């Protein structure tokens, strides 16, 4: 839905969001080893893994935008 001329903007937004997610994940990954509370580390590593496996939406948006161009 929306202005067809803005379809590429939606795709660019999804790509930026995915890049932000990957950058944030790297910040978490570099800091987790320095935390001594292993329960905290395990919990947050699992949360991060779950988030990273559910990033198909950006790819789906990209394909949808391409189909509209």
Image (cartoon, rainbow, N blue to C red):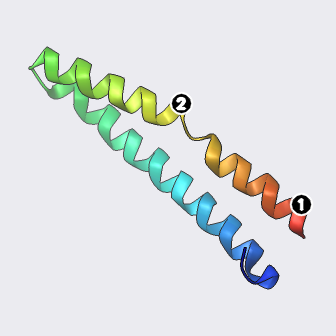
**Viewer-proximal residue among 58 and 1:** 1
Q: Residues within 10 Å of mark 1 (few under 14, many from 20)?
A: few
**Residue 18 higher or lower than 68, as above or below:** above
Q: Are marks 1 and 2 in contact (CB under 8 Å)?
A: no
In the rendering, at what x and y percent does residue 33 appear? 23, 24
Residue at 89% x, 60% y: name it. 67
Quarter location, residue 56: top right
In the rendering, at what x and y percent does residue 43 appear? 24, 22
Residue at 9% x, 20% y: name it. 36
How many numbered marks are there?
Answer: 2
Residue at 54% x, 30% y: name it. 53
Which mark, by number, is residue 1? none
**Residue 13 as seen in the image, left or right of residue 34:** right
- Furthest toward the left, the residue is 37
**Residue 66 higher or lower than 25, as above or below:** below
Determine the CA span between mark 1 and mark 2: 24 Å
**Residue 10 higher or lower than 62, as above or below:** below
Which mark, by number, is residue 67? 1
**Viewer-proximal residue among 28 and 8:** 8
The N terminus appears in which quarter of the rendering? bottom right
Q: Residues within 10 Å of mark 2 (few under 14, many from 20)?
A: few
In the rendering, at what x and y percent does residue 41 appear? 21, 22
**Residue 60 higher or lower than 17, as above or below:** above
Quarter location, residue 4: bottom right
Q: Tag 2's secondary structure? A: helix
Q: Tag 1's secondary structure? A: helix
The residue beneath circle 2 is 53
């Amino acid at each position: 839905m929306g202005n067809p001329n803005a379809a590429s903007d939606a795709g660019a937004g999804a790509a930026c969001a995915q890049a932000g997610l990957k950058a944030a994940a790297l910040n978490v990954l570099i800091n987790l080893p320095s935390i001594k509370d292993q329960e905290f580390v395990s919990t947050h590593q699992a949360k991060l893994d779950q988030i990273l496996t559910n990033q198909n939406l950006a790819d789906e948006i990209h394909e949808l935008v391409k189909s509209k161009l």
